[in-house]
Image (cartoon, rainbow, N blue to C red):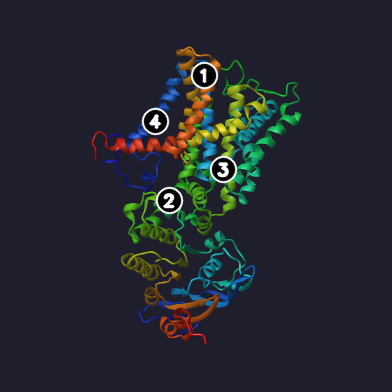
């Protein structure tokens, strides 16, 4: 009864093509947006922002980026951490070189820089596929981390080798640095997340998305209908890296504030984002959000229950968390290879008829 | 038939056959030491239905792959619409207006029928990445304009009901039809069909034959097809090329080919003494 299309007629192809073709769905989406922009900022404090909202929003961006490459274009990548590092160091260099420019543009430019780097490391994808490509992107991961450790210019010759986010403003409001307000950081990241999600959705439902999916599903047939595989794959690498770069820039400048590259952007980060899109659902924007929410919320939840509620020691809880995450990933791969997004789709189909059986 | 007339002729049932559209000149294709195609020449005229037949392993599919750019022949020339074609990639061939279907269906399984057919229009969609990202202006107009063309093809092939179904859920016969729809959506000048009726029952074959004839009749599309069902080939095609062991052994109208001694030998076997 909720997701029913009955009585919801469409009289043009534009209406038929919209992101949420079902009226109920559309209103639910507007309601979520309104809540996120107009209600949440008044009620959040530092704990909520740092523990849940910022990581969720930023990982969502990274997951959407990786999903475009892996889920839509079928090119496996293990270099997400490295590309996030590129975004972080690019925004750091921009922040320190042009202190008067709004951070908003710095983040966008950092995304652009990452896109270029992504295309460079995407070049091998023209020759190699599958596991072999994954190994090639793994090389990007290790090379980039090594580069940012090795060349002092990237961290402005600081003695610790760390980079620290200076205080920068957007429209006169402080969004980076230790004294920025929780709501300002939240809104800043939320704006980026919404923009990225809308762009990703538009790209994937149109011509470009069809080219990517054609390459993913059958590259020979894609070529025969006129898709230039070189261009399609490199565009996927560029767009994906742009989003991942934006995520890396926000991760460093707004969320963490201080970064040591091997720790913040190591291979673990690549796997974390990959797990997000596998659990969330490959080839789905909603799945990227669901996966990010799942992997951000679950540790917090587990910790609150086990340590806060049951009084277990912290280290035991932390180990149990590893076990549970690993177990869940295996379970998901076996039971629902299409992830949370597929569960959501099935639920929607059931809700269409509910409470009637047919 | 009067194949000698370069300007074309009119068939018995009143269809107009134009001048030569595609000409293969002395094509030889080798894989290492194996000769898949040996010195074959034939032409395809505008508006005709041209069949390529032959026993298994005769090199028919290789020939189609040469036309669509998967293989580059070691010797010989391909002429298309009066120009010699430089070696090109498959996607460039597609942009010239040559579409094809595959022997074993090559649809995009993860996409809906509609999206699959829409991919056939890729060559007509030129909007930039930025316009697509904001889904306004040129991108949206293009999407609607091309959707109209696609809907006409969907109507024509009678697959309206499965428009939004994921391709992976469809039965074999419908998949074949969707693949034809994708090729037709490109509004090709030359349509290559690799065994369009393989694995179909009689009814599905009749449907497919009707579609092929209608495509040729209504859109004037030139069609080259490979098929093993001799009844279908003889009924549908204007001219037939017969291949055996990579060589051309016959070329002409269905009647001429049927009475060609080499063709009979190749299909029925010949006594060696």
Q: Nearer the viewer, mark 2 or mark 3?
A: 3
Q: Which residue is mark 2?
A: B115
SS type, badge 1: helix
Q: Are marks 3 and 4 on the same chain?
A: yes
SS type, badge 2: helix
- Report, in whole angstroms, how far the alpha carbon at label 3 lies from the one at label 1: 32 Å
Q: Are marks 3 and 1 on the same chain?
A: yes
- Point out residue B61 in the picture as x, y percentages from the top left corner: 51, 68
Q: Is residue B179 above or below residue A110?
A: below
Residue B201 makes an appearance in the image: yes
Residue contact between numbered discs 4 and 2, judged by CB atoms under 8 Å: no
Please tell me the numbered disc located at residue A30: 4
The quarter of the displayed image where residue A7 is located: top left
Q: Is residue B137 left or right of residue A80?
A: left
- Report, in whole angstroms, how far the alpha carbon at label 1 lies from the one at label 2: 47 Å
Please tell me the numbered disc located at residue A76: 3
- Dot 2: chain letter: B
| Residue closer to the observer: B37 or B218 | B37
First in sequence: mark 3 or mark 1? 3
Q: Residue furthest bottom?
A: B273
Q: Is residue A183 above or below residue B176?
A: above
Please tell me the numbered disc located at residue A317: 1
- Point out residue B62 in the picture as x, y percentages from the top left corner: 54, 68
Q: Is residue A103 above or below residue B109?
A: above
Q: Residues within 10 Å of mark 3 (few under 14, many from 20)?
A: many
Q: Residues within 10 Å of mark 4 (few under 14, many from 20)?
A: few
């Amino acid at each position: 009864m909720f997701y029913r299309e009955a009585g919801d007629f469409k009289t043009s192809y534009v209406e038929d093509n919209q992101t949420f073709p079902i009226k109920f769905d559309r209103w639910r989406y507007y309601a979520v947006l309104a809540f996120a922009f107009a209600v949440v900022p008044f009620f959040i404090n530092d704990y909520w922002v740092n523990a849940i909202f910022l990581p969720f929003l930023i990982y969502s961006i990274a997951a959407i980026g990786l999903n475009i490459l892996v889920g839509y274009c079928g090119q496996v990548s293990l270099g997400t951490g490295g590309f996030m590092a590129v975004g972080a160091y690019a925004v750091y260099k921009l922040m320190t070189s042009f202190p008067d420019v709004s951070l908003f543009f710095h983040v966008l430019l950092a995304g652009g820089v990452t896109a270029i780097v992504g295309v460079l490391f995407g070049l091998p994808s023209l020759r190699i596929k599958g596991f072999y490509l994954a190994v090639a992107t793994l090389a990007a991961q290790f090379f980039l981390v090594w580069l940012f450790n090795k060349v002092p210019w990237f961290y402005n010759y600081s003695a610790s080798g760390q980079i620290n986010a200076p205080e920068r403003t957007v429209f006169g409001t402080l969004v980076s640095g230790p004294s920025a307000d929780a709501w300002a950081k939240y809104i800043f990241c939320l704006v980026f997340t919404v923009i990225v999600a809308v762009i990703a959705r538009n790209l994937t439902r149109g011509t470009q998305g069809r080219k990517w999916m054609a390459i993913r599903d059958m590259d020979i047939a894609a070529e025969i209908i006129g898709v230039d595989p070189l261009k399609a794959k490199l565009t996927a690498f560029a767009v994906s890296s742009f989003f991942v770069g934006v995520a890396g820039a926000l991760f460093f400048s707004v969320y963490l504030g201080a970064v040591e590259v091997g720790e913040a952007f190591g291979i673990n980060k690549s796997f974390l984002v990959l797990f997000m899109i596998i659990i969330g659902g490959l080839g789905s924007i909603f799945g990227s959000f669901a996966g990010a929410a799942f992997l951000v919320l679950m540790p917090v939840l587990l910790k609150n229950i086990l340590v806060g509620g049951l009084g277990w020691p912290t280290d035991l809880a932390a180990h149990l968390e590893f076990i549970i995450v690993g177990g869940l990933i295996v379970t998901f791969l076996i039971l629902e290879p299409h992830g949370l997004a597929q569960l959501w789709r099935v639920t929607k189909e059931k809700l269409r008829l509910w409470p009637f059986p047919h | 038939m009067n194949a000698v007339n370069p300007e074309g002729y009119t068939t018995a049932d009143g269809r107009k056959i134009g001048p030569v559209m595609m000409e293969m000149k002395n094509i030889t294709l080798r894989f290492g030491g194996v000769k898949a195609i040996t010195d074959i020449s034939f032409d395809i005229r505008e508006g005709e239905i041209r069949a390529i037949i032959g026993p298994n392993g005769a090199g028919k599919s290789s020939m189609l792959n040469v036309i669509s750019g998967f293989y580059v022949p070691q010797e010989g020339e391909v002429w298309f619409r009066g120009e010699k074609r430089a070696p090109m990639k498959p996607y460039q061939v597609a942009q010239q207006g040559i579409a094809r279907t595959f022997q074993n269906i090559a649809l995009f399984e993860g996409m809906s029928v509609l999206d699959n057919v829409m991919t056939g229009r890729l060559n007509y969609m030129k909007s930039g990445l930025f316009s697509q990202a904001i889904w306004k202006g040129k991108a949206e107009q293009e999407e609607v304009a091309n959707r109209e063309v696609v809907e006409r093809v969907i109507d024509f092939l009678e697959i309206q009901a499965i428009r939004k179904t994921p391709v992976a859920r469809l039965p074999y016969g419908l998949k074949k039809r969707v693949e034809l729809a994708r090729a037709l959506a490109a509004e090709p000048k030359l349509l290559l069909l690799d065994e369009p009726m393989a694995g179909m029952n009689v009814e599905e074959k009749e449907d497919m034959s009707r579609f092929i004839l209608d495509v040729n009749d209504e859109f004037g599309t030139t069609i080259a097809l490979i098929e093993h069902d001799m009844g279908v080939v003889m009924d549908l095609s204007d001219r037939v090329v017969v291949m055996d062991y990579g060589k051309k052994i016959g070329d002409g109208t269905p009647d001429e080919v049927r009475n060609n001694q080499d063709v009979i030998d190749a299909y029925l076997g010949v006594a060696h003494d």
